[in-house]
Image (cartoon, grey):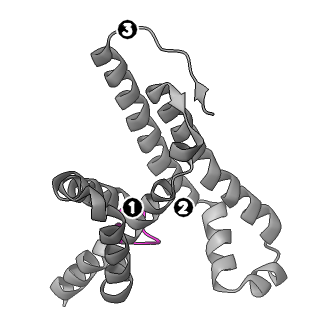
């Protein structure tokens, strides 16, 4: 049936600025945490596991521990974002909270920017949200079809996202 949440104090503008600041702070903390993980022991261990888990285990990498840590970190930030979002909308309905588009859109954002890059998902989110606001609001009935076509197009023609174009251009300029 859903769940009503208490309304926060202040006017609409004050609430909007509060939740904008909260989400922006979470985004910054997430990017900084990603950088820290990438440069740290956890990131090195995860890259070793990605390349060859059996070889990493033989070299002394505790694959279960590092996988559990990665899984925990990957759930923590979306969980906090969901808590902030729930406080903002003051109501949680299962049909809204578990909508398939809410699960697919972050994946598309990462695909657009570039998987395996630090700033690719940030760039992908900006591009995707700009596209969504500019184009898809006019085509509500075909929103899911356009999203599916975008996913297929990305996988076939731009599998490494927009960051791969930047890397290619930087590589071409060096030679």
Q: Is residue 20 left or right of residue 132?
A: right
For the stretch drawn in magenta, the main secondary structure is loop
Residue 60 higher or lower than 172, as above or below: above
Magenta segment: 112-119
Residue 39: image tag: 2
Mark 1 secondary-structure assignment: helix
Q: Give whichever of discs 1 and 2 has the lower sequence position.
A: 2
Task: Kindly indicate the quadrant of the structure image that contains residue 94.
Answer: top right
Q: Is residue 118 magenta?
A: yes
Label 2, residues with CA under 10 Å away: few <14, some 14-19, many ≥20: few
Q: Is residue 6 left or right of residue 139?
A: right
Q: Give whichever of discs 3 and 1 has the lower sequence position.
A: 3
Residue 27: image tag: none
Task: Name the one closer to the observer, 72 or 98.
Answer: 98
Residue 114 higher or lower than 136, as above or below: below
Q: Position of residue 33 (x, y in %)?
A: 53, 49
Q: Give whichever of discs 3 and 2 has the lower sequence position.
A: 3
Residue drawn 28% across the image and 73% down it = 162
Residue lying furthest bottom in this view? 175
Task: Kindly indicate the quadrant of the structure image that contains residue 5.
Answer: top right
Residue drawn 27% across the image and 56% down it = 140
Task: Kindly indicate the quadrant of the structure image that contains residue 160.
Answer: bottom left
Q: Position of residue 104 (x, y in %)?
A: 47, 63
Task: Name the one closer to the observer, 53 or 144.
Answer: 144
Query: Mark 1 — residue?
Result: 121
Compute the Cα span from label 1 to label 2: 18 Å
User: Do we see residue 163 in this rendering?
Assistant: no
Q: Is residue 158 left or right of residue 88?
A: left
Q: Position of residue 170 (x, y in %)?
A: 22, 79
Residue 10: image tag: 3
Mark 3 secondary-structure assignment: loop
Quadrant containing the C terminus is bottom left
């Amino acid at each position: 049936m859903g769940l009503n949440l208490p309304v926060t104090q202040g006017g609409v503008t004050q609430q909007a600025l509060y939740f904008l600041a909260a989400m922006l702070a979470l985004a910054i903390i997430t990017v900084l945490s990603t950088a820290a993980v990438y440069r740290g022991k956890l990131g090195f261990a995860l890259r070793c596991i990605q390349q060859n888990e059996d070889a990493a285990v033989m070299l002394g990498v505790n694959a279960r521990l590092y996988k559990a840590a990665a899984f925990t970190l990957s759930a923590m930030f979306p969980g906090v974002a969901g808590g902030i979002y729930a406080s903002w909308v003051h109501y949680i309905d299962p049909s809204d909270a578990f909508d398939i588009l809410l699960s697919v859109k972050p994946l598309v954002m990462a695909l657009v920017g570039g998987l395996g890059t630090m700033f690719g998902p940030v760039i992908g989110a900006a591009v995707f949200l700009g596209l969504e606001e500019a184009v898809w609001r006019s085509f509500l009935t075909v929103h899911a079809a356009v999203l599916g076509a975008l996913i297929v197009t990305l996988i076939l023609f731009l599998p490494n996202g927009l960051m791969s174009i930047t890397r290619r251009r930087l590589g071409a300029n060096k030679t």
